[in-house]
Image (spheres, rainbow, N blue to C red):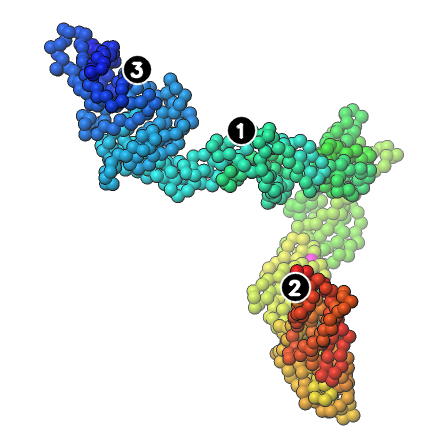
């Protein structure tokens, strides 16, 4: 360590003395440097186990400053140590207490000058850098490896991490300064002026100068090595979470595509793979989906071949004329992968150009518009979908103007409205569909003329204005052959008008003659003394001396101003209101004596119907003198208002008001009434029926006549009890019936609103037992090697009392078949379905299974059968 002034020059020599060799090391000139330096001496032949004595001599060049040596120069020897030729990064440990000053002095490790690190870190990790003289990484103390990727950990140092700072667990490397070719820093995991402070959260390494990877979960890493403690973000590699798992830079290359398959070339060369360079991809898998699908499909996982870096893959079972999004997932040799950075490409399957000869084009002309419709049919699924329809619109405006051609892209696939056209013009139209392969043949050219308007007449834009009991009439004179061209020459016009009807009272025309006035060189006239709220008919003619010219009339009808009506409808006594449980019919009429109070042209009636319970308002309008509302709620109060509405509007203060309440809902008759079980012996009968108005029914009234010779009836009210075997039906069983062979049952629903019940349904039957129906929907629910579980539904009709089911099993594939006795399955309750397990069967054999119904009177049904083949062992 030395501290020379700027005026002092010096050289240093080393003396090496031993009994075998007395040599002088050539003088070495030290650069001016304020701090601690290390001089490495090479090319000295030392012998093993030989003690050497080294001395260092300082020679000042400028001897005239010798008297200032003690003042300006401090020199001392801190350490002399032996180093091998390959341990340039061996660590020199200096106690911080031995270095004066507030901050540790930097050490010069190699040669006798300071090594300047390059700004380019390259692939060096954990703070390492590349010096200009070498392409190798210079690692900070506590890290080693080709890229400084391995951390020694706590209390360890050296190029092989075998150095131990301290044998005391409470001290370890605290308070030490580690000096290598990297420079002098605090040990890993420590910082501060005395190198005794632990790294703060999110930092690690020598002097805590490194930041944990941003992909460490919770920003936690080991302060000594930088290893992420809580793991990595998805796609990043433990332990440091700096690199991603490998992924392809570019998507696959399309080699070939047909209607149902795409062949791709996958590039697995290093220049197309990004991510960690140490972990190598081992497998790959294709992810693909059409652009309209939401979920990716995946291919099978395959091993990456290392032959030439390329692999061909074919994706099959695709749809023609469809764009697909395809990417490659690389799976590393540790089984992990990076799904977030898959690079996808778009590829399309081809298709056949459709062969369409007729587009079924229909044209309809409107005012200033043409509505064109068409239809196409794709019969072959390999044909391309039509992606756009282009309409070509052509027109010749006049002899002096050029043709106008427009191409219009339709926004629908079945029709288009061409608007903003000129009225009375002839247009030519053709349709050209296109697919992804290009345009299809155009349709033939169709011609159509738009509808005419009033623009072709000589009198145009007749207008009126009412003011002070006067109708002011204005009009324009135009050229009939040139649109919108005003005629400025003097013209004699004739205006004719008459009162047609007084609308407030009647639509009947008033008998009145025309009044005719000749107007010269004017286009306006005032009609005096008009009648309010009346209709006038006004006609304007052009007088032309040439009598051969045809004159087209222009007639308008004018209503004098109207106001709100001051009257209301009245109920028609000849047609009283009709109210049911869900509807009302109301008819009204107008009082002829108050017709003058209508004050306008009667257009319709404005009607409000209010549900007074739920406060729901229905609004409608009608031109009829009656109204019918259906789908009303039963037993609900309503308020009905009827207003007279003219073309001017309606008066909210004048209306016909009626309040009413709907009746209760009618009860429908029961349906599907049957006697499904009976017993003459037990004097019992069970009936079943279906009823759709479940929510309104309170019960059912059942009456039956046991003896037709005696006019006596038994009446019972039964609750609405659903069947246990048929949940959608109602069932009831009658016991203790009088002995008889003939019964007639009548049933009708009842409710609170209709306590006397609704419509009646009846059924007559005899009590003699008969053959029951077969079990329904026989099937297997489980097939094993030696057993079968069968299931069947309850018979629809018992025709008696159901006692049991008999199950017959017969082996039909073996010549020497074993006899299986029929099984009796007793019925204890009526259920929708029954299950039975047949065991002890032969594996692989085929059996015929039959199930038949048996009543207590020993009537049995025809069997329901099925064949079943058992599994083999």
Tag 1 near tag 3, CB within 8 Å: no
Q: Position of residue 143 (x, y in %)?
A: 35, 31
For label 2, the SS is loop
Q: Position of residue 50 (x, y in %)?
A: 23, 21
Q: Quadrant of the C terminus?
A: bottom right
Numbered disc in front, either 1 or 3: 3
Work out whether 676 lies above or below 614.
below
Count neighbours of disc 3 (C-alpha within 10 A) and say few if under 14, some if 14 to 19, many if 20 or more: few
Residue placed under numbered mark 2 in the picture: 784
Kindly report the secondary structure that dominates the magenta region of the rendered protein: strand
Q: Could you tell me how far apart the alpha carbons at marks 2 and 3 are, in whole angstroms?
A: 89 Å
* Magenta region: 604-608
Q: Which quadrant of the figure has residue 288? A: top right
Residue placed under numbered mark 1 in the picture: 270
For label 3, the SS is loop
Residue placed under numbered mark 3 in the picture: 43
Work out whether 830 lies above or below 451.
below
Q: Earlier in the sequence, mark 2 or mark 3?
A: 3
């Amino acid at each position: 360590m030395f501290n020379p002034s700027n005026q002092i020059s010096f050289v240093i020599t080393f003396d090496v003395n031993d009994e075998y060799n007395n040599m002088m090391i050539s003088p070495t000139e030290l650069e001016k440097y304020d701090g601690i330096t290390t001089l490495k001496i090479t090319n000295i032949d030392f012998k093993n186990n030989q003690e050497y004595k080294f001395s260092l001599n300082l020679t000042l060049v400028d001897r005239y400053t010798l008297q200032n040596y003690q003042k300006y120069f401090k020199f001392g020897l801190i350490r002399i140590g032996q180093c091998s030729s390959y341990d340039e990064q061996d660590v020199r440990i200096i106690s911080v207490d031995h270095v004066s000053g507030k901050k540790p002095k930097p050490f010069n490790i190699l040669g006798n000058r300071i090594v300047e690190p390059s700004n380019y870190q390259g692939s060096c990790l954990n703070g390492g850098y590349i010096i200009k003289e070498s392409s190798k990484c210079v690692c900070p103390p506590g890290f080693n490896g080709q890229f400084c990727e391995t951390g020694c950990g706590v209390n360890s140092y050296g190029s092989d991490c075998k150095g131990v700072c301290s044998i005391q667990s409470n001290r370890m490397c605290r308070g030490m300064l580690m000096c290598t070719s990297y420079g002098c820093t605090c040990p890993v995991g420590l910082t501060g002026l005395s190198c005794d402070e632990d790294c703060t959260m999110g930092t690690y390494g020598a002097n805590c100068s490194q930041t944990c990877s941003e992909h460490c979960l919770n920003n936690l890493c080991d302060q000594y090595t930088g290893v992420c403690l809580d793991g990595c973000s998805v796609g990043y590699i433990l332990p440091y979470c700096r690199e991603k798992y490998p992924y392809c830079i570019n998507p696959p290359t399309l080699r070939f595509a047909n209607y149902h398959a795409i062949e791709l070339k996958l590039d697995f060369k290093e220049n197309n793979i990004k991510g960690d360079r140490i972990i190598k991809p081992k497998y790959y898998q294709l992810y693909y989906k059409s652009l309209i699908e939401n979920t990716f499909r995946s291919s099978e996982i395959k091993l990456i071949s290392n032959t030439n870096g390329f692999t061909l893959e074919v994706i099959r079972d695709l749809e023609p004329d469809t764009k697909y999004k395809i990417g490659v997932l690389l799976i590393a040799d540790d089984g992990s992968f990076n799904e977030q950075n898959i690079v996808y490409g778009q590829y399309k399957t081809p298709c056949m150009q459709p062969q369409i000869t007729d587009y079924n084009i229909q044209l309809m002309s409107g005012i200033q518009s043409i509505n064109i419709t068409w239809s196409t049919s794709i019969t072959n699924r390999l044909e391309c979908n039509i992606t756009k329809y282009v309409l070509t619109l052509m027109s010749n405006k006049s002899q002096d103007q050029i043709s106008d051609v427009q191409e219009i892209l339709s926004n629908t696939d079945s029709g288009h409205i061409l608007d903003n056209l000129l009225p009375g013009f002839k247009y030519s139209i053709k349709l050209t569909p296109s697919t992804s392969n290009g345009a299809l043949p155009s349709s033939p050219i169709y011609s159509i003329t738009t509808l005419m308007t009033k623009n072709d007449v000589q009198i145009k834009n007749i207008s009126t204005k009412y003011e002070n009991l006067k109708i002011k009439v204005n009009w324009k004179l135009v050229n009939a052959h040139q649109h919108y061209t005003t005629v400025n020459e003097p013209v004699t016009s004739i205006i004719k008008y008459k009162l047609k009807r007084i609308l407030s009272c009647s639509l009947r025309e008033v008998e009145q003659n025309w009044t005719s006035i000749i107007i010269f060189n004017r286009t306006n006239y005032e009609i005096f003394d008009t009648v309010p709220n009346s209709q006038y008919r006004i006609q304007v003619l052009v007088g032309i001396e040439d009598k051969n010219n045809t004159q087209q009339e222009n007639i308008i009808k004018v209503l004098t101003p109207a106001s709100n009506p001051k009257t209301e409808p009245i109920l028609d006594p000849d047609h009283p209101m009709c109210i049911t449980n869900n509807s009302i019919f109301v008819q009204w009429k107008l009082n002829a004596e108050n017709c003058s109070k209508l004050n306008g042209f009667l257009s319709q009636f404005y009607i409000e119907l209010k549900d007074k319970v739920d406060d729901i308002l229905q609004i409608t309008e009608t031109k009829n003198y009656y109204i019918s509302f259906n789908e009303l709620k039963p037993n609900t109060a309503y308020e009905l208002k009827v207003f007279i509405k003219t073309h001017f509007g309606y008066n909210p203060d004048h209306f016909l008001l009626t309040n009413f309440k709907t009746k209760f809902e009618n009860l429908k008759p029961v349906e599907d009434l049957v006697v499904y079980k009976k017993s003459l012996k037990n004097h019992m009968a069970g009936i079943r029926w279906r009823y759709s108005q479940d929510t309104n029914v309170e019960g059912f009234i059942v009456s039956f006549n046991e003896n037709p010779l005696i006019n006596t009836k038994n009446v019972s009210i039964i609750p609405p009890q659903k069947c246990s075997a048929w949940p959608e039906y109602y069932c009831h069983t009658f016991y203790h019936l009088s002995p008889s062979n003939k019964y007639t049952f009548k049933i009708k629903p009842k409710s609170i609103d209709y306590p006397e019940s609704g419509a009646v349904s009846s059924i007559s039957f005899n009590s003699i037992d008969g053959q029951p129906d077969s079990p329904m929907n026989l099937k297997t629910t489980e097939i094993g090697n030696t057993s079968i579980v069968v299931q069947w539904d309850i018979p629809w009709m018992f025709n008696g009392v159901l006692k049991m089911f008999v199950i017959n099993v017969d082996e039909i594939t073996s010549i020497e078949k074993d006899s299986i006795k029929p099984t009796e399955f007793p019925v204890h309750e009526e259920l929708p379905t029954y299950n039975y397990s047949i065991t002890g069967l032969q594996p692989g054999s085929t059996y015929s299974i039959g199930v038949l119904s048996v009543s207590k009177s020993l009537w049995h049904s025809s069997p329901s059968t099925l064949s079943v083949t058992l599994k083999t062992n």
